[in-house]
Amino acid sequence: QCVNACPCGALDYRSEIGRVFRAINDPGKTTVAFVAPAVRSVVSSQYGISYQEASQFIAGLLKKMGFDKVFDFTFAADLTIVEETTEFLTRLQSQERIPQFTSCCPGWVNFVERRYPEIIPYLSSCKSPQMMMGATVKNHFTELSEIDPKDLYVVSIVPCIAKKYEAARPEFATDGIRDVDAVLTSTEMLEMADIKLIEPADVEPQDFCEPYKRVSGAGILFGASGGVAEAALRMAVEKLTGEAITDRLDYQEVRGLQGIKEAAVEAKGKKVNVAVISGLHNVEPILEKIIEGAEVGYDLIEVMACPGGCICGAGHPVPEKIDTLEKRQQVLVNIDQTSRYRKSQENPDILRLYDEYYGEANSPLAHKLLHTHYEAVKREPVAKHDRRMADSAFVT
Ligand code: SF4
């Protein structure tokens, strides 16, 4: 009932701490954790450590908890950008199913399936970074390390409650083996550290594990609203111009906590208009225009259900101060600006993964493991005013 009541399917919350501890303590299982970009900002404030130390601290903390391998979810954000931007450029050329909506926020995807199924064709077919990472680890990593997928237990650590529901969707399993076995919120991860009585001084900072160790600053930006669009623009402009971009990497206009932001870029005479929306009620006027057949003037639209994006996810500890969200966002921007790689498409581990495994972006194997389809959730037809978030009790 809760699942049906929530407009984005995020009320199906259940703690998975017990299951994860059981897997860690099972000698027959290899346990893998991967950590979403936005978790860094919370760990940074929770333990009072700098943004430079946050990534290595998290890897050390999870190893201390007992995980065998700790991967960086940001790697999958880079993979998502390569897949999604390739799809976007194909659609842009043919002008079919434009605007393309991002699909990395399961709260947004659930909302479309439940309230605006007419928009389904406009969604990118890319899985979210969580599900791309799960599918890659369960297929590529098990092949590389000669582990039976049945013996690999994969735990995703995220700021998001909707991702628990997403990981449990029936389509996200291959031959009966789930892509992601359990999803912990960042709050649950901090609780596990408390249960194990781990103090910051006990944590030995370390790198994330191979073969998904290197990540780009663009992937880190996924943790806040505007990050997906900014990372996509860094790749789209390069592909459209055929030239490496070094001077215009920052798109300040899509950063920040406003509900609607816009950017326009010109590449080789081609103009690309982007909208960045956070908070579902802000996207509804655009959805209604598209359904009515009206022109909205955007080519790419990023939508995040949580106001401000994943830094405000319900799986994070509740922000204590007014400026907490700005600080969380700044952690991500700082990491991006000091990153060795600032474009997803130049991450050497991503390039190697395509060379050795997927072939190329949007290849048949990439489509099998990294893309999905969506279905309207059956419900009685509803009047326009009944389905709008803006007219419902969900908006505060
Ligand atoms: Fe989850 Fe919110 Fe991030 Fe969407 S914006 S992926 S619902 S935390």
Image: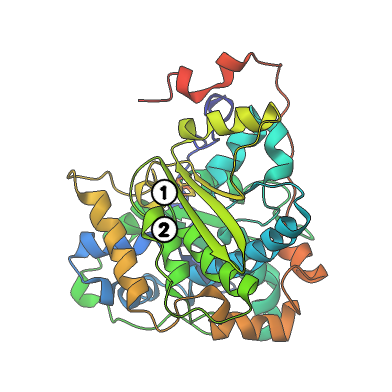
Q: Which of the image's four quarters has the C terminus? A: top left
The residue lying at 73 percent from left, 56 percent from top is 91
Residue 40 as seen in the image, left or right of residue 29: left
Where is residue 375 drawn, in percent x and y? 74, 38
The residue lying at 58 percent from left, 74 percent from top is 238
Q: Which residue is mark 2?
A: 223
Check the image and report above or below for 216 versus 286: below
Which of 175/118 is in front? 118
Does any atom of ligand 1 lie closer than 8 Å to the CB of label 1?
yes
Q: Which of the image's four quarters has the N terminus? A: top right
* SS assignment at label 2: helix
Badge 1 density bin: few <14, some 14–19, many ≥20, Cα 10 Å = many
* SS assignment at label 1: loop
Badge 2 density bin: few <14, some 14–19, many ≥20, Cα 10 Å = many
Where is residue 120 drawn, in percent x and y? 71, 40
Q: Which residue is mark 1?
A: 309
Check the image and report above or below for 85 versus 384: below
